[in-house]
Image (cartoon, grey):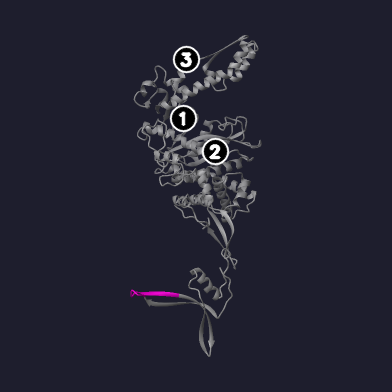
Amino acid sequence: MLMGKSSDAMHVATVISRRMNKDGLEREYRSHLVRRTFREDGKVKHQTLANISALPVGAIEAIRASLRGEQLLPAGHLMQITRSVPHGHVAAVWAMAKTLDLGALLGPAGRHRDLALALIIARVVRPGSKLATMSWWADTTLGADLDISGATSDEVYAAMDWLQGRQDAIEKKLAGRHLADELVNPQKMAMFDLSSSWMEGTHCPLAKRGYSRDGKKNRPQIEYGLLTDPVGRPVAIRVFAGNTADPTAFKTAVTIVKDTFKLDKMVMVGDRGMITSARIKALREDTDLGWLSALRAPAIQKLAADSGPLQMTLFDEQDLAEISHPDYKGERLIACRNPALAKSRHHKRQELLAATETTLAPIVEAVVAGRLTGADQIGLKVGKLIDKYKMAKHFNIRIDDHRLQIERDTAKIEAEAALDGIYVIRTSVHTDTLDAAGVVEAYKNLSRVERDFRTIKVDDLDLRPVFHRLDNRVRGHVLICMLAAYLTWHLRQAWAPLTFTDEHRPERTNPVAPATRSETAEQKTSRRKNADNQPVRSFRALLDHLATLTRNDVAIAGSETTIAMLAEPTPDQRQAFELLGQPIPVNLRK
């Protein structure tokens, strides 16, 4: 572009003339002339200084503007990007939070709510420690739009305490949405399961050593029970000491449903270690809640005895059968046999038996060679290793001072193998409400709670390890992760066309058979593109792609004005917001 000074005497004149061509058609001609205007003897006259008609239109207009006295700047100097900040990822999660009315769910508007909501969104987008999250806020539009970039650690912890203090109120609203509404939950079922995560530090009163579901046997841990609706939407969560037994945690879940949520005639669904016979007796005596669970191995063996109702002939034509037994009055028993599971368990048992024999082989060799003698010393060596793979029950062991004999207990192995792939579901739900196939499907819905645990612990939200020392901060941290999982559940559903999520799961013709993926999902996995030939990504990769949609602060030359402008969205970024049913916001608050 040109820089020109104002001139009252010079300008660009555009002269239009029309002439007839040889074909008799009128044509219009435009000439662009640089002229000087002046007065002579009281008359206005024009002097043509140059014919610039051959120049590009842009150059002609630049000369015209310059001669009018306008100041033209070199390209790029009129507007300058002073800052560019990642925006799309936090904007998308904010949009879903807006759709779910998450802000109102948390509580009244204010500084505490803004910080709590920002902690939840950050946990979805970029999980990390609270201090790392506070630094990250300033590097995204979340910090500026919620005015939290300068938040102190005291403010953040106060917001966590505020949120944890509102836990019952928040979960009541979620229960009203997803458990109490019979249009959403027609069978009135609540799923409950327990998991654990290890702790860092030694001063938290909740940190205890117990059965670790993370494989961290030598670390203190906490446990937490998650309550969901049948499709796996998180509704409530409770934190327990790390040595809490499953049935004890289930008692708390019952109290939440019955007393906190004031729900009646719900059906509690849990696994065989959760809903024991003692817990069922308490449900019968103290509540009007129903149950749906499974029997443990000893109870199944009793049903499969020679005179029992569980016989292999039940599965000659189908994989499930409804049976009864006097020990389970007022309950239905659905016996199932999964051939694929039976094959898997047989193969695993053989591997573990062989691994146990391999582990014990050096001890046997030492006894034979005379390097290890004495029944007590031999017994100590064997005792340390015999149950390494939980196979001690399948071996007969004879020890004396100079001999060690280890043999497989074939009868026990065969008896256990006969029940491979067989499980029995017990429930109080009447046949008018749920047929046998429906009972099996309801029990298998517990896998959706397990999916939520993977989201919370491993795939998306990184709950573990836990660094907080105060028990209320631990509970606040876990609550934030649960609410982030609630957001993530809805985001995954909405973004299924852009991710590897199966959009159209096939209906099971056989409820006992393993779940299968649709052909469309298999094609997405193999081609890495959807039916519209768009690239598909993992959930995390899609968030990373959305982060490349930036918001830019643009300064206008010659003024103090700064405007916010979004980068041009990619087709995938645009569709991600369309799937959320929300426009791409320039500012999260507006």
The number of discs equals 3
Is 20 displayed left or right of 529 in the figure? left
Residue 280, numbered circle:
1
Q: Nearer the viewer, mark 3 or mark 2?
A: 2
Which residue corresponds to the image point at 56% horizontal and 51% vertical from the top-left? 113
Q: Which residue is mark 2?
A: 458
Mark before the other along the chain sequence, 3 or 2: 3
Please tell me how crowded label 1 is: few (under 14), some (14-19), or many (20+) other residues with Cα within 10 Å: some
Is 295 displayed left or right of 480 in the figure? left
Q: Which residue is mark 3?
A: 411
Residue sitting nearer the eye, 448 or 442: 448
Which residue corresponds to the image point at 42% horizontal and 28% vertical from the top-left? 425
The furthest residue to the front: 22
Residue 39 in the image, given as x and y percentages of width and height: 53, 87
Q: Amino acid at mark 3?
A: Ala
Q: Amino acid at mark 2?
A: Val
Residue sitting nearer the eye, 385 or 73: 73
Which residue corresponds to the image point at 57% horizontal and 44% vertical from the top-left? 127
